[in-house]
């Protein structure tokens, strides 16, 4: 996992003398670089930067951005960003408005999104359970995954009582640290991955990291003991949440089943009842997926 700070870098081609040794100007430029996309020699930096540019349009509520705004958001030089924007626009991943003189995501991004979802029936498998949770407990119910330091909503179901309060839809993001969903996603990870993740979370949440780390550790203990974790007044001061990890067979990424609602509609007793139901649903889904995988191997 790489944060935007890790993967933003200047893409100007270094100037070197004819003998291949770096020039003084090149050495100064290297010292001023904000970072390197990857040290893996097989990593294509230009491709990585192009994906970072696309991701810039997925953060926050901004739909349209100018080239300068994109450059500032991703930390790349304006000429480099301009070339990436033109290439992505030409391929249909971005749309440029001559009237606005700004960019937004293009239709080609949708085709990738649908292609990513189509081979996996997990959304179709989980949706009935989410609807049951939303209708039974009057909560926002979701299937969530992790994207770097954020939780991203992959499938959602609303109850009528929470629709106007929780404005979360597919693709919405909430913090990883300090939320029940985030802690459920972190809890099953191996310790080496958690340690690496904590380094980046500490950098993002410097002022509140000690408090957030304690809440994450508490969430991990709750998952180990009860199979689910709870959070009160987490990502929004009036929102309570409860979540349980969903672990697929075959070593695929960890997902989370989660429910949230305004605090007055989700007290501790209701959180526990929902948490127990989330664990039961997760075990049922995992068993169905395991059976499907075994049937595929036999056929």
Image (cartoon, rainbow, N blue to C red):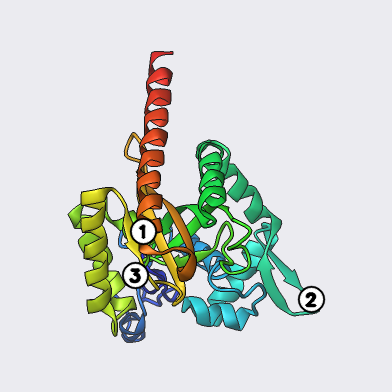
Q: Residues within 10 Å of mark 3 (few under 14, many from 20)?
A: many
Q: Is residue 273 visible?
A: yes
First in sequence: mark 2 vs mark 3: 2
Residue linked to disc 3:
178
Residue linked to disc 1:
269
Q: Is residue 120 visible?
A: no
> Where the C terminus falls, by quadrant?
top left
User: In what element is the residue under mark 1?
Assistant: helix
First in sequence: mark 1 vs mark 2: 2
**Spatial separation of the CA atoms under disc 1 and disc 2:** 55 Å
* Residue mark closest to the camera, 3 vs 1: 1
Residue 278 in the image: state x and y as whole percent.
Answer: 40, 46
Does residue 249 appear left or right of residue 68 in this picture?
left
Residue linked to disc 2:
98
Residue nearer the viewer, 256 or 231: 231
Residue nearer the viewer, 27 or 83: 83
First in sequence: mark 3 vs mark 1: 3
Residue 279 in the image: state x and y as whole percent.
Answer: 35, 44
Residue nearer the viewer, 89 or 139: 139
User: In what element is the residue under mark 3?
Assistant: loop
**Spatial separation of the CA atoms under disc 3 and disc 1:** 20 Å
């Amino acid at each position: 996992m790489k944060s935007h700070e890790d993967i933003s870098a200047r893409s100007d081609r270094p100037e070197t003398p004819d003998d291949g040794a770096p020039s003084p100007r090149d050495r100064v430029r290297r010292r001023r670089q904000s970072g390197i996309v990857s040290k893996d020699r097989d990593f294509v930096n230009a491709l990585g930067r192009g994906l970072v540019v696309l991701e810039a349009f997925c953060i926050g509520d901004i739909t349209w951005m100018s080239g300068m705004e994109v450059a500032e958001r991703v930390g790349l030089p304006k000429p480099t960003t301009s070339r990436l924007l033109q290439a992505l626009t030409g391929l249909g991943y971005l749309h440029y408005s001559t009237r606005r003189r700004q960019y937004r995501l293009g239709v080609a991004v949708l085709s990738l999104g649908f292609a990513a979802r189509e081979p996996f029936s997990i959304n179709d498998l989980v949706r009935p359970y989410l609807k049951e949770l939303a209708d039974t407990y009057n909560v926002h119910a979701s299937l969530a995954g992790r994207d770097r330091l954020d939780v991203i909503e992959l499938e959602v179901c609303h109850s009528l009582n929470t629709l106007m309060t929780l404005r979360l839809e597919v693709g919405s993001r909430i913090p990883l640290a300090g939320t029940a969903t985030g802690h459920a996603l972190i809890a099953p990870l191996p310790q080496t991955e958690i340690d690496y993740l904590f380094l980046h979370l500490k950098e993002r949440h410097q002022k509140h990291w000690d408090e957030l780390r304690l809440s994450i550790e508490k969430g991990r203990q709750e998952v180990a003991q009860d199979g689910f974790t709870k959070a009160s007044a987490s990502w929004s001061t009036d929102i309570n949440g409860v979540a349980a990890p969903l672990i697929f067979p075959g070593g695929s990424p960890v997902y989370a089943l989660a429910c949230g609602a305004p605090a007055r509609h989700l007290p501790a007793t209701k959180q526990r009842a929902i948490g127990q139901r989330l664990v039961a649903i997760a075990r049922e889904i995992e068993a169905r997926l395991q059976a499907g995988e075994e049937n595929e191997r036999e056929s």
